[in-house]
Amino acid sequence: MTRHRLRLGVNIDHVATIRNARGGAHPDPVRAARLAAAAGADGVTAHLREDRRHISDDDIRRLMNEIDLPLNLEMAATDEMLEVALRHRPHAACIVPERREERTTENGLDVAGANLDLASYADRLARAGVRVSLFINPDERQVEAAHETGAPVVELHAGTYCEAAAGWARDAELERIERAAARASELGVECHAGHGLSFGTTGPIAAIPDIVELNIGHFLVGEAIFGGLESAITRMRALMDNARASATGARSA
């Protein structure tokens, strides 16, 4: 697979979480998307949950109408969310598992054992010009099952890696991600990664040549409290670029 510049997608969900905690219009996630663009992000991610706990339908409308960056709409595999995606036609739709009681997405889709007709969702979205990705755990079997649905992209759940203690446990999770990304590349499936990434955990993931996009949100919004959103994104962008460049140089040597 042709190697690409490592892209950064910024998830703005939790700007909306803060807004909704108080009510009203501030802070505005659309303003956050503009700041992300100015700081070097390549795209914006927003998860329209079934219970609308953070991003709202109006946020999606405004992001489509007011932001030049491509929008990646995270969504559950439901008829309601499919209708939303087909109405707005974002650049991409990432299908994720969703449980109302969870605080955040806890796992990847079990594509290999799913009772959901993910191939049908992927087909209908693709016919509408929406690029489909499936959010999965870093497991070669799940990558192969995702490929069989016809989805052109997978996003690997990096949360277990990020939460593992530094040392052998984290190294083992990193190896799982590397193997899954390599399998995706073999199958011609574009590979992304996300969930839980921070300044301390992003470098080794950014160095994996088969991963072409990272989606990062909660950490950047949290860092914005202390130093500003543009500063946090600029630092993450530089960290990603340096890690990729160092890894490329090492492989060339």
Image: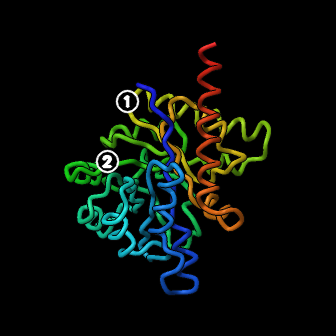
Distance in Å between CA atoms under marks 2 and 1 = 15 Å
Residue found at x 59% / y 23% = 248
Q: Does any portion of residue 115 appear in the rendered image?
A: no
Give the SS element for disc 2.
strand
Residue found at x 62% / y 42% = 238
Rendered position, 169 above or below 30: above
Q: Nearer the viewer, mark 2 or mark 1?
A: 2
Give the SS element for disc 1.
loop
**Mark 2 packing: few (<14 Cα in 10 Å), some, or many (20+)?**
many
Residue found at x 19% / y 49% = 127
Total marks placed: 2
Rendered position, 68 above or below 18: above
188 and 67: which is toward the camera: 67
* Quarter occupied by the N terminus: top left
**Mark 1 packing: few (<14 Cα in 10 Å), some, or many (20+)?**
some
Residue found at x 67% / y 51% = 198
**In the visual, does 38 lie left or right of 66?**
right
Mark identifier at residue 131: 2
Q: Which residue is mark 1?
A: 188
Q: Does any portion of residue 172 appear in the rendered image?
A: yes
